[in-house]
């Protein structure tokens, strides 16, 4: 673990005044606190690459969290060092053994990026990046560099190992999807799902969460007949930008087999795609941003299993 008394964050490169900031220095700046999700770019991989009936919402989409992040706006630190006109990107590097690094557009840094030192009202845990990490609301977790040690202002993407051999996505046409920063609109039903069992016929609450890296969730539709028809679900407030949003719909189960689905729409108009559309667009070899509609099969005995339904 990094000793907080010895921690320094270096800001340098295409700047007027290269500076380093201790943890105490960061805490002396005006702080910001906002609720956002954080999600691994590979979240959902198991449900797409290796679907099995016994998969649960946790084993499919559990690589995400939601909470209150506290830190200093990165724009404030960049004003302190004076970014030159030629500086259009940042190279953020971590203090881990691998020196994980990612190139970040300056526009994002000046928008809502922060150097975070607390989560849910307490200092970051060691495994979560203590003493400080980069946090980019709505973007892939791999860009939110933990144990942040330096930020270099540069004039173009660094094209480092972590953004060339990793975190690029092969597409069916032979090209690759790169710098796909924002997490796509997504939802998943969390109840009833595997391994739960519906005890008896009658009213059943269908509930889940939805989120988008591009803003607020505008609507979530739920289907109980495999996508043949859809009903708008109720969103639980407050509906915050780039944060998990809970949804709920009451469903009267008559004991027949059924297929449950949820489809989220965000404030930009982006719609969660079907599995068939996702597969045709991204191919079977894709490895990141699995935001296709999830399906859950309800059986007459009340058991529920995961179903890769196109």
Image (cartoon, rainbow, N blue to C red):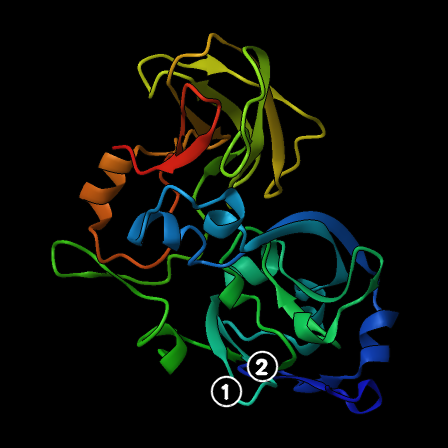
Q: Residue at x 58, y 16 (%)?
A: 204
Q: Please, what secondary structure does the residue beneath circle 1 have?
A: loop
Q: Please, what secondary structure does the residue beneath circle 2 have?
A: strand
277 vs 60, nearest the viewer? 60
212 vs 150, nearest the viewer? 212
Quadrant including the C terminus: top left
Asked where in the image residue 123 lies, by quadrant, the reply is: bottom right
Q: In front of the other: label 1 or label 2? A: 1
Side of 132 where 111 appears, left or right:
left
| Residue identified by numbered label 2 | 94
- The percent position of residue 249, horizontal first and vertical second, equals 57, 17
Q: Are marks 1 and 2 in contact (CB under 8 Å)?
A: yes
- The percent position of residue 111, horizontal first and vertical second, equals 60, 54
| Residue identified by numbered label 1 | 98
- The percent position of residue 274, horizontal first and vertical second, equals 30, 32
202 vs 179, nearest the viewer? 202
Query: Is 14 located above or below residue 199 in the figure?
Result: below
| Whole-number angstrom distance, CA of label 1 to CA of label 2 | 8 Å
Side of 109 where 29 appears, left or right:
right
Side of 273 where 240 appears, left or right:
right
């Amino acid at each position: 673990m990094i000793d907080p008394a010895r921690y320094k964050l270096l800001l340098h490169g295409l700047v007027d005044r290269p500076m380093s900031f201790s943890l105490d220095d960061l805490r002396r700046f005006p702080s910001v606190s906002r609720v956002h999700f954080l999600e691994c770019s590979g979240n959902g991989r198991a449900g797409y690459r290796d679907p099995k009936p016994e998969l649960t919402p946790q084993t499919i989409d559990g690589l995400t969290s939601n909470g209150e992040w506290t830190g200093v706006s990165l724009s404030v630190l960049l004003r302190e060092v004076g970014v030159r006109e030629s500086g259009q990107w940042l190279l953020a590097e971590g203090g881990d053994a691998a020196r994980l690094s990612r190139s970040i557009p300056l526009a994002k840094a000046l928008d809502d990026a922060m150097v975070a030192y607390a989560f849910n009202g307490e200092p970051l845990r060691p495994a979560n990046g203590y003493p400080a990490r980069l946090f980019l609301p709505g973007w892939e977790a791999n860009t939110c560099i933990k144990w942040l040690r330096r930020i270099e202002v540069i004039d173009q993407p660094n094209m480092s190992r972590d953004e060339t051999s990793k975190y690029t996505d092969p597409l069916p046409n032979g090209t690759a999807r790169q710098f796909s920063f924002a997490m796509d609109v997504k939802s998943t039903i969390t109840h009833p799902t595997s391994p739960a069992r519906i005890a008896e016929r009658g009213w059943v609450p269908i509930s889940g969460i939805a989120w988008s890296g591009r803003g607020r969730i505008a609507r979530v539709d739920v289907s109980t007949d495999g996508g043949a028809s859809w009903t708008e679900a109720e969103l639980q407030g407050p509906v915050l930008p780039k944060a998990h949003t809970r949804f709920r719909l009451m469903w009267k189960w008559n004991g027949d087999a059924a297929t449950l689905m949820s489809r989220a729409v965000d404030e930009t108009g982006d719609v969660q795609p079907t599995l068939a559309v996702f597969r045709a667009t991204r191919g079977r070899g894709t490895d990141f941003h699995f935001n296709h509609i999830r399906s859950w099969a309800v059986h007459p005995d009340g058991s529920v299993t995961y179903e890769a339904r196109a």
